[in-house]
Image (cartoon, helix red, strand yellow):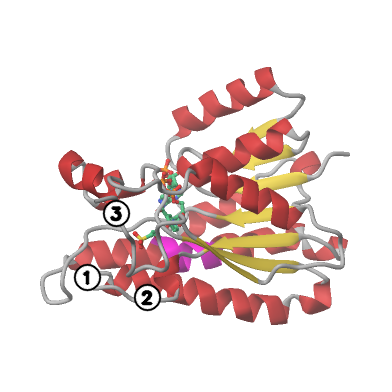
Amino acid sequence: MPEIIFISGATAGFGKATAEKFAANGYHLILNGRREERLKQIKESLENKYNTEVYVLPFDVQVQKEVFDAFKSLPTEWQKIDVLVNNAGLALGRHYTDEAELADWETMIDTNLKGLLYVTKAALPFMTPYKQGHIINIGSTAAKDVYEKGNVYCATKAAVDSISKGMRIDLLRHNIKVTAIHPGAAETEFSMVRFKGDEATVKNVYEGYKPLTAEDVADIIYYCTTLPSHVCINDLVVTATQQANSIYLVKDA
Ligand code: NDP
Ligand code: 8X3
């Protein structure tokens, strides 16, 4: 029986690329996101291209009941999760603390922090009985160094960093690995979401250097989850070569 990989936020960016990477290597997938049509297209495309099976599980990670109902609805043959990729997340706005939108803060906290916790809690009953498994939490370089106008986004990712450390300790007794992966700037839909469709600002984010791609991050997730069973990468920070951390990034002259 092929292993089953659950990916939150699989309709775009890292999640979508990770789905393709695992599908290409014969794993079965449970894919989540809010845009159900996109999930169905991805399922069709991956099942046609690779020897894989994809189960679509659309829900909003912010809504506790939706999350738990969705996991409870999994058919018997999908009730074992080998790898849980907590990837769904977003930044909204980039403003000084006194000028930021409260609603943006709420959404980031509800998605990046509470959503990750809901999904993990709902998924664990499909992992702990098997005494094996792996949780990948997607943090950010923003977890490690706070930058100007990053306030709440950075805080949610620092929380992912802390939660990953706690989970790793708590899940030792179930033999479940926990890896936090902290990427720097990567060109996905992330900035379009953050800057609410402001194309000029988005273009500037990725201009003058070669940012990470979604496929770079997918390769790293795949690498971390396919190491021997006695080896666990706890914490991994990855940036483009022209970026040192969330503050220092050198663009071409
Ligand atoms: P994208 O915007 O390309 O993808 C984000 C994914 O998250 C989408 O599939 C989206 O699906 C999903 N998502 C967002 N909100 C929800 C929700 N409430 N419920 C379910 N799914 C949701 O961004 P990235 O791929 O770049 O980002 C993935 C993760 O990586 C995020 O946690 C982000 O913070 C983090 N990250 C990104 C970096 C970057 O520079 N790109 C760097 C470091 C970390 P849908 O809209 O269909 O719900
Ligand atoms: C995304 C990277 O630098 O925009 O987490 O915070 S950054």
Mark 3: few, some, or many residues within 10 Å (few <14, many ≥20)?
few
Judging by the rendered image, the residue that carries numbered circle 1 is 149
Judging by the rendered image, the residue that carries numbered circle 3 is 251
Residue pictured at 19% horizontal, 39% vertical: 199
Residue 11: x and y, percent?
Answer: 48, 38
Q: Reply yes or no: does residue 135 show up in magenta.
A: no
Residue 87 appears in the rendering: yes
Residue 4: x and y, percent?
Answer: 75, 44
Mark 1: few, some, or many residues within 10 Å (few <14, many ≥20)?
some
Residue pictured at 60% horizontal, 21% vertical: 44
Residue 33 appears in the rendering: no
Q: Is residue 4 left or right of residue 153?
A: right
166, above or below 185, in the image: below
Amino acid tagged 2: Ala
* Label located before the other in sequence (3 or 2): 2
Residue pictured at 56% horizontal, 50% vertical: 217
Magenta highlight range: 111-118
Residue pictured at 44% horizontal, 73% vertical: 143
Name the quadrant where ligand 2 sits.
Answer: bottom left
Tell me the distance, in whole angstroms, between the alpha carbons under discs 1 and 2: 11 Å
Q: Is residue 162 left or right of residue 82?
A: left
* Label located before the other in sequence (3 or 1): 1
Give the SS element for disc 2.
helix
Q: Nearer the viewer, residue 68 or 42?
A: 42
147, above or below 112, in the image: below
Q: Nearer the viewer, residue 37 or 242?
A: 242
Amino acid tagged 3: Lys
Judging by the rendered image, the residue that carries numbered circle 2 is 155
Q: Nearer the viewer, mark 1 or mark 2?
A: 1
